[in-house]
Image: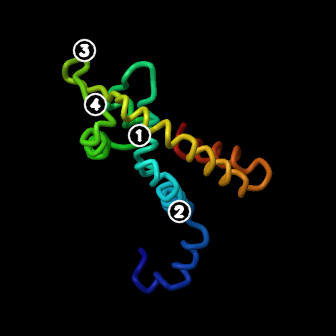
Amino acid sequence: MSTHDDLTFAVTHEVRAHCLCLAAQRAARALARRFDDVLRPAGLTSGQFSLLMSLNRAEAPAIGDVATLLAMDRTTLTANVKPLVRRRLVRVAVDRSDRRSRRLHLTSAGRQALASAVAIWRKENRALERTLAGNGAVQLRADLATLSGR
């Protein structure tokens, strides 16, 4: 059984140097901040951009499907949708085939906001890809997909 005496500062260094979870969290926060900054002129955060993009489909998706795609629980997704509904970028409607379910519709204003953000996203994403050597971006996406179970 471990004791508090086993928890040395060397353990802190070990975790900092080798913890994949910590590295992923730090990278995710840095990427989100970077995209938040560049998407600000479009009036969106990186999370809102991803959420709106997940609604850009021929048929409005169910809340559960969007939550699964974005790896969020439904409660968190609902909380993130509310400001977009207030801004009239998203509309929530009862599913015609299952009245217990709700579908998320990208409104005309939402489509316009998303369209203005795509050019910004493309430019920033290309810049990020150039910072990764060789086939780094392709490999990073593949590794992240493996880790996320996709």
Q: Which mark is residue 96?
A: 3
Disc tally is 4
Amino acid type, callout 3? Arg
Q: Residues within 10 Å of mark 2 (few under 14, many from 20)?
A: few
Above or below, comparing residue 48 to residue 5 in the picture:
above
Q: Residues within 10 Å of mark 1 (few under 14, many from 20)?
A: many
Above or below, comparing residue 131 to residue 54 in the picture:
below
Q: Earlier in the sequence, mark 4 or mark 2?
A: 2
Q: Residues within 10 Å of mark 3 (few under 14, many from 20)?
A: few
Q: Residue at x 41, y 74 (%)?
A: 1
Q: Earlier in the sequence, mark 1 or mark 3?
A: 1
Callout 3 secondary element: loop
Image quadrant in which you'd find residue 96: top left
Decide if residue 42 is on the left or right side of residue 109. Answer: right
Residue to which mark 2 is pinned: 30
Callout 3 touching callout 2 (CB < 8 Å) = no
Decide if residue 67 is on the left or right side of residue 121. Answer: left
Callout 1 secondary element: helix
Amino acid type, callout 1? Leu
Quarter of the C terminus within the rendering: top right
